[in-house]
Image: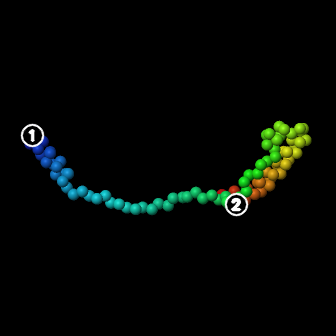
């Protein structure tokens, strides 16, 4: 048994005493997609609409509520006219 242990120990020591191979270093460049905003920096912020919940609740009567809703609709149509061309350019 002892000769086997000695032979095994000498094999282990011989394996450790060999040349150490340096790892191969490779630099690989991979393209990465970077998200870019398609919305212009000078694009106007969303305007405050007149037909908010608070404004509709505070309206004195149905005619005033209808006027607020109609004004909000006009502003939304104008806003959509600004937003749609930008969104079409993003697609």
The percent coordinates of residue 53 (x first, y second) are 79, 40
Quadrant housing residue 35: bottom right
> For the N terminus, which image quadrant?
top left
The mark that comes first in sequence, 1 or 2, is 1
Q: In this view, does 14 lie to the left or right of 76?
A: left
Q: Specify whether residue 84 is in view.
A: no
Element under disc 2: loop
Q: Residue 6, percent across and down?
A: 11, 44
Residue 12 vs residue 79: left or right? left
Q: From this view, report whether residue 49 is shown above or below residue 82.
A: above
Q: Nearer the viewer, residue 36 or 11?
A: 36
Is residue 78 found left or right of 42 in the rendered image? Answer: right
Which residue lies under the disc numbered 1? 2
The residue that appears at 86% across and 39% down in the rendered structure is: 59
Which residue shows up at 79% across the image and 51% down it?
76
Up the image or down, 21 lies above or below 5; here it is below
- Secondary structure found at label 1: helix
Mark 2 — residue?
A: 42
Which residue lies at the image location 19% right of the left edge and 55% below the top edge? Answer: 18
Q: Can residue 13 be seen in this view?
A: yes
Q: Give the Cα distance between marks 1 and 2.
A: 85 Å
């Amino acid at each position: 048994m002892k000769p086997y242990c000695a032979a095994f120990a000498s094999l282990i020591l011989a394996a450790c005493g060999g040349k150490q191979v340096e790892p191969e270093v490779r630099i690989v460049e991979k393209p990465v997609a970077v998200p870019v905003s398609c919305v212009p920096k000078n694009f106007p912020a969303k305007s405050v609409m007149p037909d908010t919940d608070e404004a509709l609740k505070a309206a004195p009567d149905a005619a005033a509520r209808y006027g607020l809703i109609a004004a909000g609709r006009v502003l939304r149509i104008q806003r959509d006219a600004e937003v749609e061309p930008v969104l079409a350019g993003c697609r």
